[in-house]
Amino acid sequence: MNDRRQNFQDPWRFVPKGWSAGPWPRLSPVFLATARSCTNLVSGGPLLTVLCVLLFSWSWTWSAIHEAVLLAKWVYVLAMTLAGLSIIGMTFRPGREPERHQKFHRERSVARGMAGAVVIMAIVLWVLLSPSIPGAFQPLPSLALPLSGLCAIGVIMLLQAVRLMDEMERSILSEAAALTAVVLTSVFMVWTLCKPQFNLPDIDPSWALFTATQVFFAILWLFVVLLRTERWDPADYLGWDARHERQL
Amino acid sequence: MKNRLRVLRAERNWSQAELAEALGVSRQTINAIEVEKYDPSLPLAFKMARLFGTRIEEIFSEPDDQQDEPARA
């Protein structure tokens, strides 16, 4: 088994020694690759939108830009869903965990709570964006109750994750939330002031929610990667490999 | 805030993960403190001092430029 783990092409290579067998190890490379690529996509949300606008708004009219942003929205919501689900997949382990990996229990609970909240947020965004008409927001009365219930579950998962976070993780989260509020308020003020002069469209609630999500995750990523930690890798954070043990 | 956390940890031959586990924080937090990107709270600083069997002042110190300033009354 050890030889198999040393083989770079083997799906077992991400599985620490001592983990029990089961279908999970076979899915490990899929979870890891999806989590890495989709979290990068989610964190680069504003960049993704700019790229979509540059690539797909051929005529540079408001309607063409709306179409391009709509495409970015769908890609973004899909990336959020996949990132959340793959991180949740990485946090579950079948069988008994070896003692040296039990120390990642807190990290896994935090990641599971945050990823669960992100998946729920993506579902809510998906439903809100589903009318697919740029600028149109429908209250979706028939889905109001299930959506409210889903939001409540998301909030509970987020609170549970925050409760388990350590002080630096909490400080990063609160600083990112504060900076997002400042950025969005500034953009809203400038947009409102410039609206009559440049004939800008009204701010749509679903667009506002989508932009707020993008800006929040981009700032969160900026804080995590540039300001506080050396980098954030789901594999490292969740103890999927032994790189942390080499850092003395 | 300067600190001697990396030195104290190396003296005891602990990894960042082992120290993080003993203090109940993530390894990333220990790394951020060591590279002076994050200043720990007072309770965490006390916890570190207790773990290393030393005083907080022997782990953390002010940056040189602030140490040179005369103390205010």
Image (spheres, coloured by chain):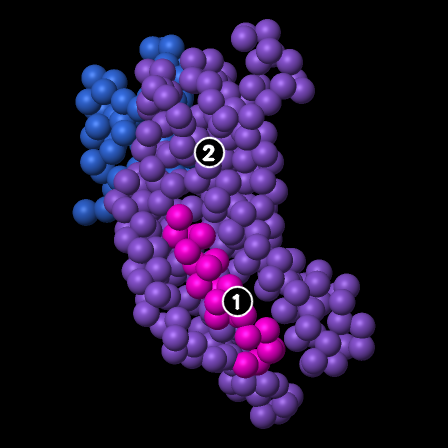
Task: Name the spot of residue A164 as percent of width and height, x first.
Answer: 28, 40
Does A222 sit left or right of A18 as displayed?
right
| Image colour assigned to chain A | purple
Q: Residue A75's spot in the image, x, y percent?
A: 62, 58
Compared to residue A78, the image places residue A145 above or below, namely below
Magenta stretch mostly in which secondary structure?
A: helix
- Crowd band around label 2 with a 10 angstrom C-alpha radius: few (<14), some (14–19), many (20+): many
How far across and how far down the image is residue A96, in percent?
Answer: 34, 19
In this rendering, does residue A132 appear at all? yes
Three-letter residue code for mark 2? Met
Q: Determine the image quadrant of residue A102.
A: top left
Viewer-side residue, B53 vs B13: B13
Disc 1 is placed on an element classified as helix
Question: Does the magenta portion include A124?
Answer: yes
Label 1 to label 2: alpha-carbon separation: 28 Å
State the residue position of label 1.
Answer: A211
The residue beneath circle 2 is A90
Q: What range of the chain is rendered magenta?
A: A116-136
Apparent colour of chain B: blue
